[in-house]
Image: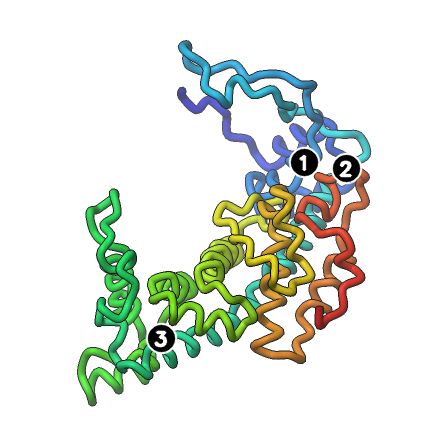
């Protein structure tokens, strides 16, 4: 299918939105906003403002047997906007989302640094170069070949680790290379890892080493903890690349811990919608931060920001429900 949408000037973009029913009270300001942020980026924030069709099935674009998706009865977004919604509402939502991403990144930085220490200290006690010894890691990680390139996840991790070391401009990396040569001890090398590199190595640890680390955070099953880190890495990438966090579906979803774990948000896993939304990951972040820094004020800062949510719509898509907030979260104590 060929792309046939025409190029529009910023003024024409505003006109199009107004024709579709979105209120624009200050056109020069709206034009300036589109020049700085862009129509397509902002469209993710006014998407929930659009009217929806009645229940229907989609028509396949290519003739033939319809897919399961085509057979699904659902509503579809229309070009027209719901009445009473403004261009500025989308901008306010964008600014709220930016503040939310920065707050999440602040927390993830603390978690990343702490877990680098946990992993490097645990493996380093066995061997300063344990990350280069496959027998000290999980067999699934080092021996199981993936179907994409016929290599193990460990091979892919080593390649990424080597790339991070090679491109590092840190003086301490240069110093260790010059003085001691390669390889570099894990408690030094870990300082160049990003969240993805760190979380993938954790997933490749032996069960006993995973459990040893996860128990420090009050989670008995290291495999569950590994899934949490994978989900947080996905969240980190969303935030670091300035993508929309509000109203996002979480692709890498965290596994449910054992029912015996004392977590205020444990019941969230009983609702698939909540598991697929960012708020559950915010709860996980807070849980980890309480171990890293018991006096953290992060949850308080998050609560204050959520209470500043710019929309007051009755529909879930126009409220904090789009983040997957868990009932009663406002009443949680900071040490729950």
Q: Vertical placement of 156 versus 110: above or below?
A: above
Task: Give the image location of residue 62, x and y in percent.
Answer: 41, 14
* Residue for badge 1: 48
Depth check: give the residue in front, 266 or 110. Answer: 266
Task: Give the image location of residue 182, x and y in percent.
Answer: 19, 79
Question: Left or right of 91: which side holds 107?
Answer: left
Rounded to the nearest whole Å, what is the CA distance between mark 1 and mark 3? 42 Å
* Residue for badge 2: 315
Depth check: give the residue in front, 190 or 94. Answer: 190
Rounded to the nearest whole Å, what is the CA distance between mark 2 and mark 3? 46 Å
Identify which residue is drawn at 21% across, 52% down: 151
Rounded to the nearest whole Å, what is the CA distance between mark 1 and mark 2? 10 Å
Task: Give the image location of residue 260, x and y in percent.
Answer: 61, 62
* Residue for badge 3: 190
Identify which residue is drawn at 69% across, 30% down: 50
Q: If you read the primary sequence from the N terminus, does the residue marked by circle 1 or circle 3 appear first?
A: 1
């Amino acid at each position: 299918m060929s792309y046939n949408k025409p190029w529009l000037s910023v003024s024409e973009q505003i006109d199009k939105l107004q024709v579709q029913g979105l209120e624009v009270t200050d056109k020069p300001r709206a034009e300036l906003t589109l020049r700085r942020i862009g129509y397509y980026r902002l469209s993710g924030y006014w998407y929930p403002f659009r009217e929806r069709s009645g229940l229907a099935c989609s028509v396949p674009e290519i003739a033939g047997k319809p897919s399961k998706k085509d057979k699904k009865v659902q509503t579809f977004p229309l070009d027209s906007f719901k009445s009473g919604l403004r261009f500025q509402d989308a901008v306010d939502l964008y600014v709220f989302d930016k503040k939310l991403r920065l707050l999440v990144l602040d927390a993830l930085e603390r978690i990343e640094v702490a877990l680098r220490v946990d992993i490097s200290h645990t493996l380093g006690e066995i061997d300063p170069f344990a990350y280069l010894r496959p027998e000290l890691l999980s067999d699934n990680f080092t021996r199981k070949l993936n179907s994409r390139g016929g290599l193990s996840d460990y091979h892919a991790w080593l390649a990424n680790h080597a790339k991070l070391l090679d491109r590092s401009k840190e003086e301490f990396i240069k110093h260790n290379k010059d003085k001691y040569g390669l390889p570099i001890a894990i408690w030094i090398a870990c300082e160049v890892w990003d969240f993805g590199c760190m979380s993938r190595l954790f997933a490749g640890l032996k069960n006993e080493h995973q459990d040893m680390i996860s128990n420090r955070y009050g989670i008995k099953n290291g495999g569950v903890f590994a899934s949490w880190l994978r989900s947080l890495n996905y969240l980190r990438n969303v935030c670091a690349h300035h993508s929309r966090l509000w109203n996002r579906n979480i692709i890498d979803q965290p596994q449910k811990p054992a029912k015996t774990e004392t977590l205020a948000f444990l019941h969230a896993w009983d609702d698939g919608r909540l598991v697929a939304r960012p708020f559950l990951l915010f709860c996980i972040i807070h849980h980890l931060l309480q171990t890293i820094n018991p006096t953290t004020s992060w949850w308080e800062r998050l609560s204050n920001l959520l209470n500043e949510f710019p929309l007051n719509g009755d529909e879930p898509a126009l409220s904090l429900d789009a983040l997957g907030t868990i009932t009663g979260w406002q009443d949680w104590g900071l040490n729950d």
